[in-house]
Image: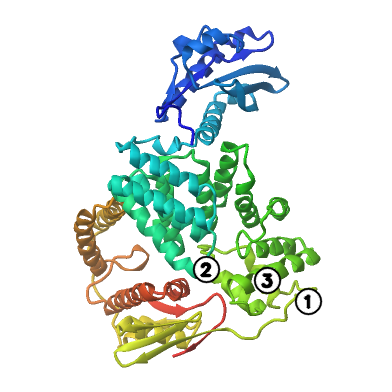
Amino acid sequence: MELVGNKETTIAVLPFQIIGAENSMSPIIKGFTEDLIINFSKFIGLSVISQYSTLGISDIADTESIGKLGADYIITGSFRPITEGYRIGIQLIRTKDNRVVFAGNHDEAMETILNAQDTITQQMVNVLQQQIEHDLLSYSYKKESVELAAYENWLLGIKELKKGTVESDLAAREYFKAALKIDPLFARAYTGISLSYFNEWSCQLWDRWEVSQKGAHDYALKAIELDENDYISLAVLGRTFLYLGDYDKSEHLLRKSLRMNPNDAGNLILISNCFVWLGYLEEAENWYIKARNLNPLHPEPYLPIGMLVYFEKGDYKKAIELGEKVANLSIWTDFTAYLAAAYYHLSQYGQMNAYWKKYLELFKRNINEGKEATNQEAVDWQKVVNPYKVKSNLEPFWNFMLGDSPKKTVQSIVPRAEAVTKGKFIHNGDLWELSYLNLSVAIKDCKGLHDIAKLLEQPEKQLNCSELMGVVLETSGTSMIDDQAMKEYKNKIRALKIDIDDAQEMGMHQKADQLRGEYETLVEHLSKVMGLSNKIRKTGSSMEKARAAVTWRIRNAIKKIEKVHPQLAKHLANSIKTGTHCSYEPEIPHEWTV
């Protein structure tokens, strides 16, 4: 691994030259170069030669002057007038062999010239860190004090992670563990272990899905305890919380990761993927484009996410264009299902059927233990495994494959299966037997489980909270609080929730517990005086008390289920609506034995 003498990499930005008669632009060019130097100097791990030393070098051929700078790399560029503005040419040159590492052009109008500075900075830093195999971006906020031997093990681990195989992930994990033996407080080593599990999880090794997800989650938490600005671990946690169905916490962590570092191409593509699930499609597209721009030499790894972004945006031709450039169509088990769906939306049923057949083959091998799968089984699995917060453009395609769409004009490859998803929710003394998606668990009795069972017995039916409580309730009463006090209470609760999340992410568990106690006391008090839609409650309103009690009972029961059966908990959380009226409204038909 090439590190420049175990020291910071030194770069020199030569004054950008102007080609043509536009001498009036000289001050702008001078300011452009100066701003680039300031931008590069913000990255810990890069030393930038002062402009006072480079100002007199006007020609790249002046090797004597350049040699005196002692730079490992030089950046040089030019401005050339074009019809609509200026073409900014840029080169990154390695001084030890005068090799051009990167060359590119940026066409900008006069009013957007300064905007190109950030793009050029980010491109150069990403190309540089590929050249020296050193993560410059990860040290752009905080330089850790770490023993050299631990750091060297971390570098070797990162090198293994880049190979992208299960075997290299295991080897990387050993290097990171060795680093922690030398320095137990080396946060980046915990991040490395988290990434090794994250790679396994992203590769969809289904026999290790939960183990890999838990490893990615737990080690990212340990990294955050030591370094609250670890943007990679923040993003990993954002994704794990997304799959756990905690969308608010997921979004909070992902956005915090972006604030810590908006310039790491690999991290941006992860966040772009997560933003698709969360429904922020414009942002997902912007981060996808930025990730590709930051890594112009190797865009291939980003194509699958680009396909996903444009599919959900409804640009099906663009999705197919990117998807068909992906060499490994088994990169996700349901990758070809997305391509099939894109062709469906374009009414190209021949290609749709071909890609759906490939999906069924992958589903049979990876998920269904070698058994032939029906369309129903393959669709149901997609609905469970993809953590959409909002509706997906897959839904009309799913209906079509199951024969439920009026648009159907051709036969799907596999006959429609009539069976619906089945499960058990059976009360047995002090325990409940729960069964869903081939996993059976037992859980201790609580009131919320009885409420859920009543809802499962009557899908789609609106049940008043009084029916679940089994009592007749009164709704009259007198106001308990004024509007101004209510507003202050709500603002305080929102502030406490943010403080609790931040304390948890930073590993400050004692502080988080103290804040949580204050939060719960305030919420309990406010629940006594506030009703639905920000309406002030009235004393003696037993209906409101029942609504709060039933809501709490059901949510508490789902949290308990989550510990032993996350998939069932996710389904119930997404399908059960609580309030004055409660209901069970699954996206697909379910048959429950209660």
Q: Which amino acid, mark 1?
A: Gln
Q: Position of residue 365 (x, y in %)?
A: 62, 72
- Going from N to C along the chain, the mark reached first, 3 or 2, is 2
Determine whether, in the image, residue 147 is placed left or right of residue 393.
left
Q: CA distance from mark 1 to mark 2?
A: 31 Å
Kindly identify which residue carries mark 1. Answer: 411
Kindly identify which residue carries mark 3. Answer: 361
Kindly identify which residue carries mark 2. Answer: 206
Determine whether, in the image, residue 380 is placed left or right of residue 87.
left
Q: Which amino acid, mark 2?
A: Trp
Local SS, label 3: helix
Residue visible at 74% across and 61% down? Answer: 343
**Which quadrant of the figure contains the C terminus?**
bottom left
Residue visible at 65% across and 53% down? Answer: 307
Q: Residue furthest bottom?
A: 429
Name the image quarter holding residue 149: top left
Determine crowd level at label 3: few under 14, some 14-19, many 20+ residues with C-alpha closer than 10 A.
Answer: some
